[in-house]
Image: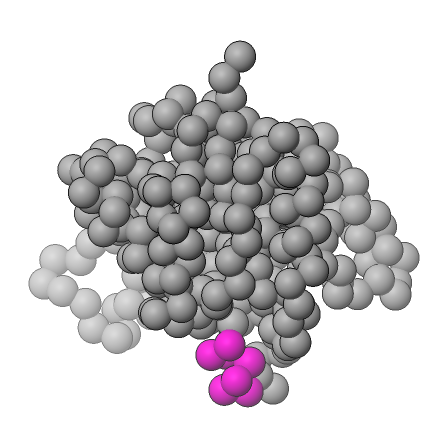
Amino acid sequence: MAGLVEGKVVVVTGAGGGIGREIAIMMANEGAKVIINDLGVSVTGEGGSATPAEQTKAIINQRGGEAAINTDSVSGWNSARKIIQCALDNFGRIDGIVNNAGILRDVIFHKMTEDDWTSVINVHLSGSFYTSRAAAEHFRKQESGTFVHMSSTSGLIGNFGQANYSAAKLGITALSKSIALDMQRYNVRSNCIAPFAWSRMTGSIPATTEAEKARVAKIQQMTPDKNAPMAVFLTSDQAKHVSGQVFACRNNEIFLMSSPRPVRSVHRDGGWTPTSVAEHGMPALAGSFMPLDRSGEVFTWDPI
């Protein structure tokens, strides 16, 4: 029986470990030829090693799949184009991209440096743009193609100490929606996944208090492979009707996440003054304010 993505050529960035590795492996299991893009850097973006990508390739090959390795960075216009060219050189085409590569530089906002900000934005947000833009030319010509971008509830909802990461991850959802709108005419789709998983990227979560230890224990139940089925589905022709959406995958749960829409309005004949906004406008709207909450305060129940 043919796999869901049989014969497709798919690039998975950050595929040397964690969620990216599991997506790459499942893509290959479902019949895709995979480009394993990974620099083998640390969680904060330092160093580099070909070993993680080689390990992913070995697993895919052992299971009878086809894969090639690419070690170019997503965070530059020219290097991102080399990632797409790698797919063309090895397999003759490109059908899908999973923008999964990422780093963390977590620090409280008033202590965040310029490098903390730009390094994270460059990999997550700019990197997703660069790889997508490079593939878009080929998708337009062949009138087919899929983008799957990794977002995060840190951006969709909020989190402490992650202004750089949160801004990038919420920006990715807007990028995806714009791609979906602009490229719909070419039969090209773009969607986001906000994954829940215990991996290197979540391994730095503090666990000193009993409450923090309980939170980490819950996250550890959510293994990276739980996010792979959605990524494979969104890349497949079975998802031809799905575009511009944001999904969250949490253990065995799948959520469709909302996009910002008006929740309440207030009108005043003759317009507003600062005083009337204070006295009438804000009191009328305040009941619908969004709370300053974090992901854990929204997803309050144990992973199912």
- Residue 78 % position (x, y): 34, 70
Taken as a whole, is the magenta stretch helix, strand or loop? helix
Q: Nearer the viewer, residue 180 or 64?
A: 64
- Residue 287 % position (x, y): 44, 51
Q: Nearer the viewer, residue 124 or 300?
A: 124
Say above or below: 58 vs 85: above
Magenta-tinted stretch: 113-119
Quadrant in which residue 272 is drawn: bottom left
The answer to whether residue 263 shows anywhere in this view is no
Residue at left offset 80%, top offset 53%: 216
Q: Which quarter of the image is occupied by the C terminus? A: top right
Judge left or right: residue 152 versus residue 55.
Answer: left
Say above or below: 187 vs 241: below
Say above or below: 104 vs 259: below
Quadrant in which residue 154 is drawn: bottom right
Residue at left offset 88%, top offset 63%: 209
Q: Nearer the viewer, residue 33 or 101?
A: 33
Q: Nearer the viewer, residue 35 or 207?
A: 35
Residue extending farthest to the top is: 1
- Residue 213 % position (x, y): 86, 55
Judge left or right: residue 185 versus residue 21.
Answer: left
Judge left or right: residue 144 versus residue 12.
Answer: left
Say above or below: 111 vs 288: below
